[in-house]
Each structure stands twice: as structure tokens, then as C-alpha cells.
Amino acid sequence: MRVALTVNGGSVATEVEPRLLLVHLLRDTLGLKGTNVGCDTSSCGACTVLLDGESVKSCTVLTAQADGCEVTTIEGLAEEGSLHPVQQAFWEEHGLQCGFCTPGMVMAAVSLLRENPRPTEPEVREALEGNLCRCTGYHNIVRAVLSAAATTATARQPATAGSSMRGSTT
Amino acid sequence: MIPAAFDYVRAESVDHALHLLAEHGDACKVLAGGHSLLPLMKLRLATPALLVDVGRLGELDYVHHVDGELAIGALTRYRTLETSPVLASSVPIMSRAAHLVGDPQVRHRGTLGGALAHGDAAGDLPAVVLALGGQLVARSLRGERRLAATGFFTGFLETALAPDELLVEVRVPEASGGWSFRKLSRRAQDWAIVGVALARPASADTPGVALVNAASTTVRAGAVEAALRAGASAAEAAEHAADGLDPPSDLHASSEYRAHLARVLVRRALEEAGWS
Amino acid sequence: MELTNEFTVQTDVERAWKVLTDIERIAPCMPGAQLQEIEGDDFHGVVKVKVGPITAEYKGTARFLEQDAVARRAVIQARARDTRGQGNANATITAQLTSLGDDTQCTVVTDLMVTGRVAQFGRGVMAEVTSKLMRQFVECLESTVLAQPAAAETAPAPADDRGSLPGAGARGGSDGAAAVAVAEPAAPPAASPGPRRVEHSPSAPVDLLEVAGGSVARRMVPVLLGLAGVLLLRRARRRRRQPPGNA
């Protein structure tokens, strides 16, 4: 069957079997290897991408279901050479070790912050329930997400001439 | 893991879906959120020849408050249930239970109708609908019928839906009085070992109590409900939680532990809902 | 795991023994089963089952390990494997008949060993399923094989009593369940040295959604089928990968 969708801003139109999972379209057809296949049983979240802006586990979505939709993978986050605030925060807060869960964690965090821009720590932990990490014990991941939230909140302050972004309250 | 090959058609309308179901019956499966069906297909435990994707039927995605009842479209996602102000004020147990399902990624895709039609005893929302004494609206080319939640879940992964029927709507009464939804899982995002849904519709004097994963189907704790009607205290009524039930025994818990858990959680749920 | 089932048939113990030890005769009553070939003492066949969205097919062999006509005790060994490679199921089934005058009580103890996906299945559901299947099996026996006049089955050659069995509708009142027509065997068994094909129609997969009803809870997966389904899925969902390196 024919599908047409947008991946990281670019149009993709191709012929696929109905049973092609979205994660396999991304990795094998489009060569976007950032999204990982971890458990393949919808548990670990390493395959998390954004589908029309919401986090989904791409191992449990058929490409056919994504027809006509917008998909964003980890490769599509950074803009023009600078890291997305969440990516930046993961770097600064050392929110990864082996990095296998990281793309999924980042995408889940991006989705979380869209829905809840100022989460508390328990809310972050709960919101990352769908993403498993074997290395870090989650501690720095949570710090990274909270840091990204603070940065994003700060950056969202309207800029007025001459004012400094730093230290503004929200 | 890759599913066995199948044919796929996207339903353009409810009517289109009904025609497909009438034509293919047992040979096809309805695909909504896919988070119960696709995992089974990836394990090749289920190998339907045809998938009828109803996921884009926006006309089945709604939450309406109508005459003391909530009419919820079958395609309403958990995320919508979780965040709906209408549900939060009139049937808060549903918002709460939806929030506890799986994880955010699952909640972005899974649907209320899918959970009910799949009929998994370990599902949370079926217990909520059962405790509320809700009704399920099933439509086919032959017409429409309303099925009471009680009696809808007929067996392990089996419901009263006919092969040519599509679940289109779920109706539950307002129930903003004392309620509780509790479940115990060992790890985050695990299925419940046992869960309890307790809610009292405005029209009832005593609550409806339903259990998650305490039997091979979603069941009401009938003995608890009867005890409450007879005036028993929370502690006394809770002792009957597992009466007449044969809880499943598996890698997570023995049947005895599940029975024990049912009694404990029912008591806590009653207390949380304000029953003593 | 050991599963015990008991049922009573409205037939005297001698006749019940004769019928119940004639696998070829009662095979059509086994839910979802199709007997395909008889090779010496081995009965080869397949069993197909459907539980909600899940389907499975097991292919296997059953043979008598013991038949004690005096004590009315039989032991059957069955071995089957999922045709899609999802596991094996082996069972030793001990059946004991006890006379209750005009009726006979049959106690069946199944020692079931499963491997592969099947092994994750909870004991409770399997026990319920086997009970359910036993009930269907007995209902079928009562309405078909055991309902016949006794004279029809005293002839030694299977060809004689084979043709008198009713055809479709092996299970009274249910549609969509195993509907089989039993035909003449291809060759007289006594003379044939090689495997004997059995011309039973393939059964429609047992769809317990359509069988029985009312308040009877329908559980699924017969003894030989490893439809771990959701239970399996829960297990699989929690199965963690090995840490890639040092964690």
C-alpha cells in the first residue's frame, strides 16, 4: 500500500506492506537509526517518537496508521546546528551513559514538556514511566528534564527591548 | 518481532467500517489504538487476515454530558479521558483510572472502546465501566443495541460483541460521590496484579465494586456489594472481595495472594471513598 | 502441572469403556480437533483453537500407554507442538471409569508439561479451559456416539459402526464449532500395515465465543494449546533485555 507522511519536516511517499511497523520504516527504509528497538513488546520506550506532536512507541504503530501524519524523530529535534533544549539539558546533566534509551527518553521528555511545561519532579518520574533505562538509575535523566523545563520556561518569557532573559521569573 | 502478513483497509466512516465487518466477520479485526492487538500480532498469537483501521473516525471521539449520563465515543483516547474537565467533575474515577493506564505513550494511542472490546481482565477501564454499571453501544448493519456492562465480558479476551458489530459509544452515569480506583503493580507501567474500581452513581445508595485481574474476566465483587447493601462496614464487606472468584495464578502472583490483595484493596478503596 | 476433570455419562460402564477407548470414534467429539492418521498405535491429528483475537494450531500424536479393561483404566500419552513454532505440549492422561449403575463416572487426571511460550501460562486458566472442553466433549459424546443403539457398535471392524455416526453438528446446539462428518476409513485397519489416513473433515476452529453461553464463563485454550495471549504478553512486557555492557 502507498503511504505519504512527513518525517522531520520532509515528505516521504513510499510503498509499504501493511505490517511494516513505523519503527522499521524509520530505521530501515529511511535510515534514521537514532530511534532504537529495545524490547519490541511496547515496554521500554526506546522506540519513542512524536506522532503529530505526541509521544508514541513506534514499535507498536503501523506505518499505515501514520499515513498523512507528522513524525518527529531524535534526528529532527536539533535546529540549525544547535541542540534542542532537552538534548542540551541531557548533555549538561549527564542524563545518559550508554545512550541506548536516550533518544526515546528525549522524545518522551519533549512530549511531556509540551503537555506540562512545568512539571514537578514526581510528575517527571511518572511521565517517564514508559521509558526504561538500565544504566543511569534515572536520577540524572530526571534532573535533565527538570533543567530543560526551567530553560524552556525562561526562554518563553516575551523578549522586550533591553531586558535580560536571565533570572526572569515565570 | 514482525506480524504475519495481513490486508489493511482504513475505514472512511462508521458506515464503511460496518460494511467491512458485515462482509468479513471473523476474518477481520478492528484496529483502534492498537496497543492490545498489535502486541499480540507481533507475537503472532493473533493473525487476522484483514485489519479494519477505525483510528481516524473522529466522529467516535467525544465526551458528552447528556442528562446525568456521560456519552463517551469508543475512539476516545486515554489521554483525552485523563484530561477531560467534564469527566474530572462528573465521573472522576474514569479520569483517574485513565491516568494510571500504562504510560503516556500508550495513553496517546489506546482507546476506551478498544480496551472494552478487547476484554482483558487485567485492563483498568473495563473495571471502571463495570463498577459504574455502564452501557456499551454496539452498532452493525443490523442496527444498534445497548449492552449492559454486566454480562458484557464473557470470557478470557471474549465479549458479547458479535463479529459484525463495532463498539461505538460507552455510557456511564454521573458518579462524583465517594469513589476510589486502586491498583497494585510491582513496577511502573506494569499491569495490575489486582485492582479495584469503586464508584457510586448518583442514583444508587451503595457503590458498585469491580475487580481488575481477580478472575479470568473483569468482574464485579458481588458479595461486597451485597454486604454493603445489607449494612456491613467497610472492613466486613471487604472480607467478601474474593467470594466466588478463582483469581488467576501466574508468574506475578498466586491465586491466594490475589484473593488476599482483593480483600485489602477493596477495604482501602471503601475507606478512601468515605465508607466505614 | 496436574489437572483433574470428572464427568458422568449416561451409559453403563462397559459400553462407556468401549466407546471411550476407541479414539477414532470419539475424536470427532474433541473440540476443534481433527484426527488425520492412524499409524499402528499412534493417532496423529491437529487441534485448532480460537480465543478472542488469538488463534493457534497444535499438531501431535496420541497413543495408549495402558489399557486395563478389567480395572477400566487407560493411560494416554499425547505430544503436540504448535505449528507456528510457539512451543510444545506433552500430556499423560489417566482416565478411570467407575460404574454408577446405569451411569458411568469418568475421572481424568492430566499431567501436563509445556515448553516455550505455553510454559508462561497460568494454571488457573488452563484448568478452567480443560474443564470447559471436557464439558463440550461429553455433551458431544452424549448426543452422538453414546446415543446410538448398542448393537451398532459391537462389530469389531471399524467399517461397520463408522457409517452409523451422524454427520455434522457433532455438538448439539452449537454452530461454528467443530462440525465433522465421519467417513469410511480408506482401508480395513486389520490388514493394512502402513499408516491409515482418516477421512475426518477438518473441523472449523473451535470458537468458544459461539459455543455454550449464558452464564457459563468462557475460558479458552485447551490443554494442548499455548494461547498465553495476554498473560504471555504481560510476561513478555516485563522481560528486560540483558544490559548491553556494564550497567
Image: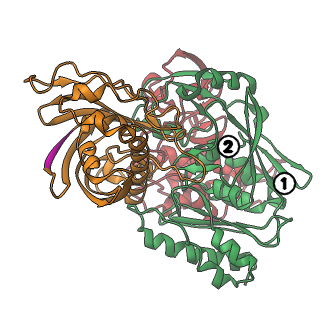
Chain colours: A red, B green, C orange
Give the residue pinned by disc 1. B86
In the rendered view, does C74 fall on the left or right side of C19?
left
Task: Based on the picture, tell me whether residue C101 belongs to the magenta stretch.
Answer: no
**Earlier-in-chain disc, 1 versus 2:** 1
Left/right of residue B78 with respect to residue B62 in the rendered view: left
Q: Is residue B106 visible?
A: yes
The image quadrant that residue A154 belongs to is bottom right
Q: Is residue A21 above or below residue B229?
A: above
Q: Can you identify the residue that label 2 sits on?
A: B113
Look at the image and give the residue range highlighted in magenta. Answer: C62-66
Name the outermost residue toward the front.
C151
- The chain containing the residue under callout 1 comes to B
Seen from this angle, which residue lies furthest right? B67
Please, what is the three-letter code of the amino acid marked with disc 1? Val
Q: What type is the residue that disc 2 sits on?
A: Gly
Q: Answer yes or no: is residue C85 visible.
A: no
Q: From the image, give the main secondary structure of the stretch colored magenta.
A: strand
